[in-house]
Image (cartoon, rainbow, N blue to C red):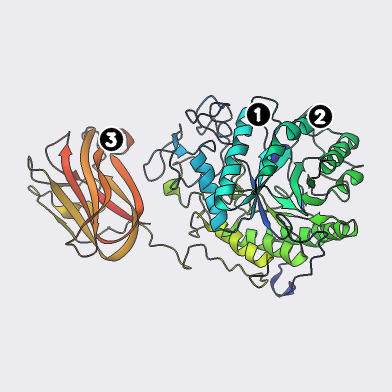
Amino acid sequence: MALTRRTLIGSIAAGSALAAVGDALPIAARPAHAASPPGDVVGKITVGYQGWFSCPGDGAPIGGWWHWSRDRFQPPAPGNTTIVSWPDLREYAHSYPTAYPNLGNGQPATLFSSYDQQTVDTHFRWMQEHGCDTAALQRFNPFGDEGPTRDAMAVKVRGAAERYGRKFYIMYDVTSWTSMQSQIKQDWTTKMSAHTASAAYARQNGKPVVCIWGFGFDDPGRPFAPAPCLDVVQWFKAQGCYVIGGVPTYWRQGINDSRPGFAEVYHAFHMLSPWMVGRTGTLDGLDWFHANVNGPDLADCAAHGIDYQPCVMPGDLSSGHRRHGDFYWRHLYNMIRLGAQGLYVSMFDEYNEGNQIAKTSETQASTPAGVGIRALDEDGTSCSADYYLRITADGGRMLKGQLALTAVRPTPPMPGGGPPPSGDLAAGRPTTASSHIQSYVSGHIVDGNPDSYWESANHAFPQWVQVDLGAATAIGRVLLRLPPSPAWQTRTQTLSVQGSTDGATWSTLVASAGRVFDPATGNRVSLTFSAASTRHVRVRFTGNTGWPAGQLSQFEVYAA
């Protein structure tokens, strides 16, 4: 497995930070002095796309849990993982069970595979819906065991870009690529250049775009001298390409993360995109970089006729940097008011480093229980799974002049501006049932007591029990429980979930199926479904392998 950029590049202190911006920030952006006119990267939002996750059974040539596990031949688990953020899985057609504990809602902890075409299509649909213009497909050394899988991913990304009207380009990462100087040319000539025939392949100034990330970094993973790096840049330019350099943060000065002596290499690129991940996690730090690094960088680029595409980032969720969107918005705002010609968002799907903008677990209910992975509400603010995609969309509009320049984040954490109804919507609400025996009445399903329960008449299926939420509410999940005592042995109840706005006409929310209640996993069953506006929610029972009746201890209903 290729090392992540976080592994190879430590954080670099920003130095003394500026005071909080507040009213001191300029209210108008500086004019952008682009060397190039608008194209597929100039004037556009580009997102870094890894596409590097695989799972056993997905058909990927590399096999195993590529990039999900440290030991890819063992399933992801708290002791064998690269994961610091958990994806929201609701829109994937396929997912794969892991060795993580169940999610907080009781569902199995599963993960997606990038090798499934539906995954890539879903990601590019999200890009389309949220104004991500161009995807930079990361391509590490393809001459090892990763090569066939990365070749296939290029085909999958090309197809998705064509279907969803997005642009894409190849972004080579030279980390640990010993024979880079000759092999990168071979790979482009024999494989990747063929993708430039697609109308979806990104072009700038009429030339196909290629990015090379890693020249000049002062670390053991990129030991290259200036001469071979310059040779590669000049070679790609001779092939008619528009060449972007993914360069160190301090490229201009040749200090800290940059080797000295690379100025000629850096100035040979058509566009420069300095790295920023791991450099700061505070608003003051972003402002310091804006004044002391990004501003002089842009001036240097302008003086040399080079386009400037700074890296912007949502913040490391696992380290608590995001400030429910304020960190990302400040970074977008600072680079747009600076006059950057385009923006590179790091990253779209980097769940290994916690800086992904793709849909992410909203709460601990959809995150593996007890393992310390932070959800989007980690600081107490409810955020929708697509929140950082929506911020990206607003940032793109601001970059393109479709939204007035503003230091105040316009994107609400929840669509509509407020949090969804929280907690169990059924708690304490009125209930009714088709029948009950003795004292096991329907009211027990909403009384909060895990040991009390409702039981229907015996030997008389079908049976049902329902709750009245009081008003039509958009719901998307129910949690069904039996008493947690081991005395309640494992049983399968055949049941469906129905909804109604008036208590008379019912629609099916969850189709009838056998649901296993197992005391080893808390005797609970969690069912999710497409959002439905419902006032009355009913569970209908047609079988029970443990007792000839419908049985339920707690019936919890949650907002979509």
Identify the mark at residue 519; answer none if there is no mark.
3
SS under mark 3: helix
Q: State left or right for residue 537 relative to residue 477.
A: left
| Badge 1 or badge 3: first in the primary sequence | 1
Q: Which residue is mark 2?
A: 182
Q: Residues within 10 Å of mark 1 (few under 14, many from 20)?
A: some
Task: Tell me which corner region of the image, top left, top right, bottom left or bottom right, holds residue 451.
Answer: top left
Question: Could you say which is closer to the camera, residue 330 or residue 39?
Answer: 39
For image coordinates 58% across by 36% down, the residue present is: 82
Separation of residues labelled 3 and 2 (CA atoms): 60 Å
Question: Could you say which is closer to the camera, residue 196 or residue 32?
Answer: 196
SS under mark 1: helix
Amino acid type, callout 2: Ser
Evaluate if marks 1 and 3 touch, with contact meaning CB atoms under 8 Å apart: no
| Badge 3 or badge 2: first in the primary sequence | 2
Residue 143 position, x and y percent, is 70, 26
Separation of residues labelled 1 and 3 (CA atoms): 46 Å
